[in-house]
Amino acid sequence: MKPIWIVDDDQSIRFVLEKALMREGLPTRSFTHPREVLQALDGMSPEDAPQVLVSDIRMPGGSGLDLLSQVKTRLPGLPVIIMTAYSDLDSAVSAFQGGAFEYLPKPFDLTKAIELIRRAVEESQREQTSATNVDSTPEMLGQAPAMQDVFRAIGRLSQSNVTVMITGESGSGKELVARALHKHSQRADGPFVAINTAAIPKDLLESELFGHERGAFTGAQAMRRGRFEQADGGTLFLDEIGDMKFDLQTRLLRVLSDGSFYRVGGHSAIKTNVRVIAATHQNLEQRVQEGAFREDLFHRLNVIRLRLPPLRERREDIPMLTRHFLQQSAQQLGVEAKRISDSAIELLQNFAFPGNVRQLENICHWLTVMAPAQAIEPKDLPPEVLAPGHNTVAVNGALASSIESPISPANTLNGSSPSTPVFGTVVAKPVVLNAPGENWQAGLEAEAMSLLASGRVDVWDEMTRRFEASLIQTALAHTRGRRIDAAHKLGIGRNTITRKIQELGLE
């Protein structure tokens, strides 16, 4: 994790924040005056860049407001927290006008200070995710005629700024197509920002897209840029556009029409230059007929339509994709890439792949972790591939698939199986290790693989919640319910364990 930079000429302030952040698992780097910060920024590598900057407002070496201005010029997305005495509230107003994330009055409550810094860290991570470098995205692979048609379409659209609608089943690679359209366009030097509109609660989606002003609603403690602002000069990818609520469709249509919008709670129009690429697995024409999707927005988005074929329509690409994903998984895990036999490849080619390319990628990652030998044989494949009735069957020359009730890899650990094995439904149960010597990492990996294969988009939050809940419950059992002792054993603060118990509903 990138460090939190602390700038203050008061050694006691630096010491207190360093120790508190260290207990929270957050790395720090401290400076005594702004000049040191600017020197560090000049010779900074991307890995050393700060996650958050916490600066005093008055120091012998310069002003925190001047530092804020210079840092924002170099790192516009960096959250900056300004520390100030109660008598400096006028300066705090200037800090907000200069783009500060929040101000921290002195003397401050340490618990609240850490909570504020954590909020800033979350905002920083959100900004980093939004500005993902497209060059790091793997190239699309495919020799099937259907994929060659897609590649030709991307080539024809490379010099155009026209709006594109990508259709296709979940997991077929719609975001990869959107990234390729951006990468080969005249906007390639600009940002590529992706947002899954179905994964964000409807009440928060408006703020995610258009941003909000400070105080616009409860919890809006700082001004925040939306995805349209973040994508200015580049491409905005709106995935699962068919799930967007009706009133928000109206606001989206306005942006597409004249290129301007208002932040939530704002009164000034903001102009943006963004190419929009939308995607959906739904039949939007039917959604229009049902009255769930605006017809004028549909026609505005549906300028060029690009259909992405499901994996079962491009079975000749499965050998190439499998070997690519096995190589990729090995690199991610730092192990030697595994080989796969022709007979195992044949089984994969006959599988229906209801989860499409994403499911194949997850299976390859599972095989990298779970296959016992370097050479993958048919017996090493996960149960859903081997289960009878789930392979692709030729019927009258057409491909038909049976996708009900495959079993996920994680649900077969320790001889267990889910009571209702329906694809896409995850049985939320902890991985049980019966002996101290068992490989719990493999169980964790398999459970994560199961969640990923189900198509969920909150795997990080779900796994983190389970892990934290199990860890805290075990520590409390060990200390017979004594929270302070449990926190000490876990190496966290008393306030932290109390907050986690409340958040996780462990009361």
Image (tube, grey):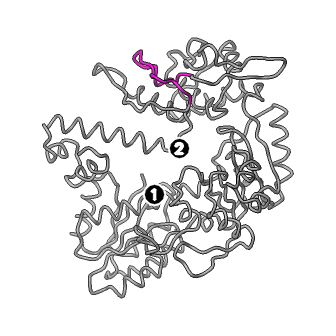
Q: Is residue 297 above or below residue 96?
A: above
Q: Is residue 249 above or below residue 378?
A: below
Say what secondary structure mark 2 lies in: loop
How crowded pointer 1 is (Cα within 10 Å; few <14, some 14-19, many 20+) is rated as some
Whole-percent x, y for residue 466 in the image: 36, 38
Whole-percent x, y for residue 164 in the image: 77, 54
Disc sitting over residue 121 in the figure? none
How crowded pointer 2 is (Cα within 10 Å; few <14, some 14-19, many 20+) is rated as some
Task: Residue at 43%, 79% (x, y): give it.
Answer: 96
Say what secondary structure mark 1 lies in: helix
Determine whether, in the image, residue 450 is placed left or right of residue 152.
left
Dominant SS of magenta comes to loop
Residue identified by numbered label 2:
457
Whole-percent x, y for residue 286 in the image: 74, 47
Residue type at the position of mark 2: Val
Disc sitting over residue 48 in the figure? 1
- The span shown in magenta is 406-423
Determine whether, in the image, residue 178 is placed left or right of residue 1.
right
Report the mark closest to the observer, 2 or 1.
Answer: 2
Task: Residue at 35%, 55% (x, y): give it.
Answer: 27
Q: Is 125 in front, or is 461?
A: 461
* Count of labels in the image: 2
Q: Is residue 503 above or below residue 18?
A: above
Tell whether position 250 is magenta: no
Of pointers 2 and 1, the one earlier in the residue sequence: 1
Q: Is 293 in front, or is 5?
A: 293
Determine whether, in the image, residue 483 is placed left or right of residue 183.
left
Whole-percent x, y for residue 113 in the image: 29, 66
Residue type at the position of mark 1: Asp
